[in-house]
Structures are given as structure tokens and as C-alpha cells.
Amino acid sequence: MRTRPLAMRGRPSIGDKMKHYDAIILGGGAAGLMCAAQAGKRGLRVAVLEKEEKPGKKILISGGGRCNFTNVDAGPANYLSDNPHFAKSALARYTPQEFIELVNSYGIAWHEKTLGQLFCDGSAKQIVQMLLDECGDSVDVLCDAFVSAVVHEDGAFAVAASGQQFTAPKLVIATGGPSIPKMGATGFAYDLARQFGLKVVEPRPALVPLTLGGEDVLFRELSGVSAPVRAHAGTQKRPGNFGISFDEAALFTHKGLSGPAILQISSYWRPGEEVGITFLPQSDADWLLDLKRDRPRAGIKTALREHLPDRLADALAERLGIESELGNVSDKALKSAAEKLADWRFSPNGTEGFAKAEVTIGGISTSELSSKTMEAKRVPGLYAIGEAVDVTGWLGGYNFQWAWASGVAAGESL
């Protein structure tokens, strides 16, 4: 594998002086490098065109620099897509255990955190170097390669990038989605897909903080406060029908709500819908009545402070409007307070957008692709993998596992 910079511009035309490859992969991120490595092992000559100055930039920032490289529990149920069955084939044929075995073969130490999340003990740089080493001598990883044009003629793809011309019978779109634009992310994959007549599911930010307005804005005073909660997704039209929930931490910010539980639920949230928070997910429905019986002189603020950060406990107690000792409060009022704490509704007015989103929901429609090979059904030789495709995982290593699995699926087919 050779990694080097390019220097750019120009429109390709089949027949011009070109560098010929068996496959061209646009994007040197997780999916692109995995695909290149798989193809390289089969002896194919592959060019990976990466527009940034080095490959794997999102890998490098993942997990605080230690890369949450997979999740031991990754399966189809952990992914969102217009076609929830699409990811099954690739995920079944390249599992988290197989990637773990690859990591182990390079002597990279790792550890498991909560909820099946795996991280490097050392640095994410180890994962990038591993992928580059896997690519072998038949893969050229070319950085600073800004693609200015792509042409498809007579069964071949021609690409102009940084003043050079490339051609190959196979082209892989692995440029990701528009999340984290400061890392160079763009919607290039969608533009290219549309150029070839492929449908694109409208992209939107996912794993992203939610913003609050109206009466909810009062909670901004709690900026910096975090607590373990259960976050639910639901709609105003279907009160109480949440469908899915996540038990993790929520964080109040100066703009609204964040933290793992909120990021997870943001992928299911739609404008105009509510988000429900259970502040004491481990408590039963009658916990306040039990406390009234056992400690009638306790106040609601004291009771909440035993389970939640003081600032949050005080804010919730104030909004519940119970000022007397529990012994002086009716059972009905306490039951109502417990129900409110178990299903506190927020009405987000938006998200912090692609700038703060970890991934993108939507992308190249799975209806256009083979679930086994990731090849476009109507454009032979064209493939799409990773975040460019309408398959989005939960927080916690799931999106990397999709990158590895989809990359292997395409790499075996090129």
C-alpha cells in the first residue's frame, strides 16, 4: 500500500492519458479502506482517492481518540433504514468477532466499556495503520485527491482528481455523509448518486443534540448537569406510544439536551414530536407513596436529591409544585408527581444540525443496491458503502461495524 498526496483539477475523457486500475474507491475512511483491503487481498489494483491530507480522519477522532471500533452486540435491529432488512446480509457475513480477530492479529490492545462498546487501549491511529497495512502493495491510497469529475463510458469509469486522470471498470462511493463538516464531510456521495440516476433518501442529522425552546428553555439553567435516564421517542399525536427507549445518561446544555440517551433517541425523533424522559428509571410507580409511609417528614426535594444531582432535583421539585412534607401531600398528588417524573415530556424545536451530528440518516437508497454486493442494480460496476448508504447505526460502535461489513461485501465483489 502506498500513501501519497496528489495536486488537482481537470475533466476526464475516456481515451486521455490515464492511470488504469481494477477499481477506484472514492473516500479513504473506514468503509473505503476496508473495501480496498479486501479487494487488495484478491490481487486487484485499487486506487483510493481521499480528499483530506490523510486517511481515516473520522476514525482518528472516534471515541475520544481511542476509536469505538465495533460493538459486540451489533445486529440488524441496531440500524435504521427505509428498508430495515437491507443490512442483514452484510452484517451476517462480517461480524464484530471477525473484526475483533483482525484487531487481535495486529496485537492491538482493547477493552470493553458499557453496552458492548469496544475501544483501543492506546490510540485510534492503530486502527488506521492496521487498515492501511491490510491494503497491501496493490492498493494506492492517494490523499489531497479532490474529485472534480466522474464519467461513465463504455463500461468504464473515469475520474479526474487533482490534475490526474484515473480509470477502472469498478467505482465505489465511500465518501460518507455530511455529518461533521469541519472534518471535510460533504454531500458529494448524494450528488454522484443522482448523477447516475440513483434515488437518495433525504438525509438528516442523527446522533445529534436536541435544542429546546418555549417553556422547555427554562431547563437551560441546568447546563452541564448530567443524570442517568430513560429516553423515549414518541409523537404528540400518539401520547405515551414511544416504541423505543434508551437507558443512558442525558446532559442538559445551554441549547437543550445531549448525552448518550438523547443522541440515541435523536435518530428516531422528528420535528413536531415529543421526547419523553424517565428521570428515575429504576424506581417503581409507587416509590413516592412508599417514601411517604416510611418518611412522612421528608420533602420532595430531599427525596429527589437522593437519586439525582442537586440542581436537577431542585428544578424538578420546583416544577412539580409540591412544597409540603410528603406526609401532608395527598396520595393522588404524589402518584401524579411520580407519573410526571416517569414520563417528563420535552418538545424539541430542532437539532444542532450536521455540524454536531455524529452520523447521517438517509443517503443512497437501499432499493438501488444489492444487499449482498452493495452494487447498484441499474449501473453495473458502481457500488456504495458505509455512511453514504441509507443505513444508520446506534451510538456505540455500530456505525463502524456497518462500515467494515459493507466494505467487505463490496470488496469481495469488485
Image: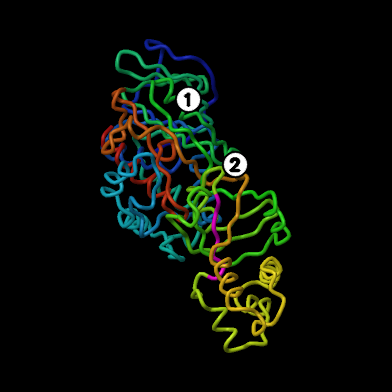
What secondary structure characterizes most of the magenta part?
strand
In depth, the one of 159 and 284 nearer the eye is 284
Q: Quadrant location of residue 112?
A: bottom left
Q: Is residue 185 magenta?
A: no
Horizontal side, residue 381 vs residue 141: left or right: left
Q: Which residue is mark 1?
A: 191
Per the image, label 1 sits on a secondary structure element best described as helix
User: Residue beneath label 2, please?
Assistant: 353
Task: Name the residue at 32% across, 28% down.
Answer: 376
Q: Is residue 244 above or below residue 227?
A: above
Under circle 2, the secondary element is loop
Q: Say whether disc 2 or disc 1 marks the residue closer to the N-terminus.
A: 1
Please give the range of residues in magenta. 274-280
Disc 2 and disc 1: Cα gap in Å?
20 Å
Q: Position of residue 312 (x, y in %)?
A: 67, 68
Q: Quadrant of the C terminus?
A: top left
User: Above or below — where is 373 with respect to 326?
Assistant: above
- 323 vs 186, left or right, is right
Residue 125 vs 150, above or below: the answer is: below
Residue 221 screen position, x and y as percent = 73, 60
Residue at the (34%, 25%) spot, across then down: 21
Q: Which amino acid does the dot numbered 2 rest on? A: Gly
Horizontally, residue 330 falls left or right of residue 413, namely right
Disc 1 marks which amino acid? Asp
Q: Which is more foreground, mark 2 or mark 1?
A: 2
